[in-house]
Amino acid sequence: MVSRSYRLLSKTLKIQGRELKNRIVCSPISTNSASTRGEVTPSIIDFYSTMGNSGCGMVVVGASSVSQEGISTQNCMRVGPSYLEKGLIKLASSIKKTGAISSLQVFHVGSQGNTNYTGQPVLGPSQYVCPDIQISVKELSRQKIIEIEDDFVKAIVSGFRCGFDFIELHLAHGYLLHNFLSEHFNKRSDSYGRSAKNRLRIINNIFEKVRRINPKLIHRIAARISGNDFVPMGLTIEKNKGLIELLNSYNIAYWCVSAGIYETAKMKSDYMKQGAYWQYADKLKKMTQQCGATF
Ligand SMILES: Cc1cc2nc3c(=O)[nH]c(=O)nc-3n(C[C@H](O)[C@H](O)[C@H](O)COP(=O)(O)O)c2cc1C
């Protein structure tokens, strides 16, 4: 017998005009099985089609990098350049054929990158050394930040062109956009740091640039945010208030909450066991409702 609290799971859900046949979502999972140029491979198609065929309402494709320097593993998927679109079109359509809605998560590895995979310096808003990786971050110049904003915009537009219903911005787990948001990583004194408003600048600029290309697209962008970084200067759901208000003003497609960064990865399962992630989601929902969001 289905418990009363799970009954909603089988109900349809409309998000920005797209209908999920139920409320079961396959979380973003990187399979680390793209070609070394970041292309979709048959094994990636197999994996996400199997997820779709399991009967879930939406499949979120795991973190796909907006550039070569932004990859997190040797075989990380990528999105943006036109040579990647053939594979991405095939992937989006194979998920669609299963009856599931498709979402593509996009990211740049940022301060938790590894030169051994990218052949390039590890880039982030400020000096930082990830304890597990032990490579110093090269602080981003303003010019380079603008180029990265453009990489995100190119990736978002390309993902939609390839047929994905939604594009999910990865704003959690200690990757680049999260690095800018969190004072644990962002110690800048220029217009991309120093104040809560400035730490939102890179994300705001990405939305504004997408809006200039096609205003309708911004409502099909979604966000995975950090409910807790588990470090004193890090983010909590409450400290994300400014981000929540900003993205709410763009009427984004959906929210998803996760937690932790590489250096606090071991704490994730303890907090999950305590049900903390449910509390972050609950608080997030209340905060978006206070902003006047519609769920
Ligand atoms: C192999 C693996 C790859 C993952 N890749 C991503 C990813 O690309 N992006 C992301 O936001 N989360 C990623 N996650 C986290 C999951 O989306 C999910 O939040 C986490 O596994 C907790 O859910 P679970 O208890 O159902 O496993 C990954 C998890 C695993 C186990």
Image (cartoon, rainbow, N blue to C red):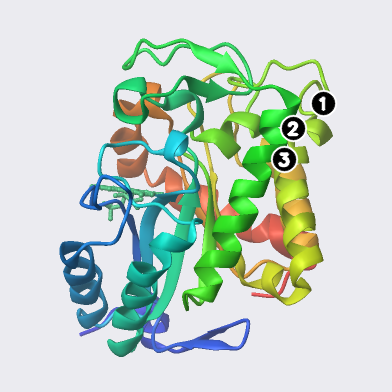
Q: Tell me where residue 210 appears, x and y as whole percent.
A: 72, 61
In the depicted structure, whether residue 264 falls above or below residue 21: above
**Which residue matches tag 2?**
199
Report whether the residue tagged 2 is closer than 8 Å to ligand 1. no
Q: Circle 3: is it few (<14), some (14-19), or many (20+) Cα within 10 Å?
A: many
**Which residue matches tag 3?**
202
Q: Earlier in the sequence, mark 3 or mark 1?
A: 1
In the depicted structure, whether residue 278 falls above or below residue 185: below
Q: Circle 2: is it few (<14), some (14-19), or many (20+) Cα within 10 Å?
A: many
Residue drawn at 63 percent across, 81 percent down: 16
- Are the residues tagged 1 and 2 within 8 Å (C-beta)? yes
| Front of the two marks 3 and 1 | 3
Q: Tell me where residue 204 appears, x and y as whole percent.
A: 77, 48
Residue 195 is labelled as 1
Judged left or right of residue 43, residue 107 is: right
Residue 21 is labelled as none
Cα gap from disc 3 to disc 2, whole angstroms: 7 Å
How many numbered marks appear? 3
Q: Tell me where residue 205 appears, x and y as whole percent.
A: 77, 47
Give the position of the N terminus as an image quadrant. Answer: bottom left
Quadrant of residue 179 in the image?
Answer: top right
Q: Is residue 238 visible?
A: no
| Front of the two marks 3 and 2 | 3
Q: Circle 1: is it few (<14), some (14-19), or many (20+) Cα within 10 Å?
A: some
Badge 2 amino acid = Arg
Badge 1 amino acid = Ser
In the depicted structure, whether residue 208 falls above or below residue 157: above
Quadrant of residue 268 in the image?
Answer: top left
Q: Is residue 72 visible?
A: yes
Badge 3 amino acid = Ile
Report whether the residue tagged 1 is closer than 8 Å to ligand 1. no
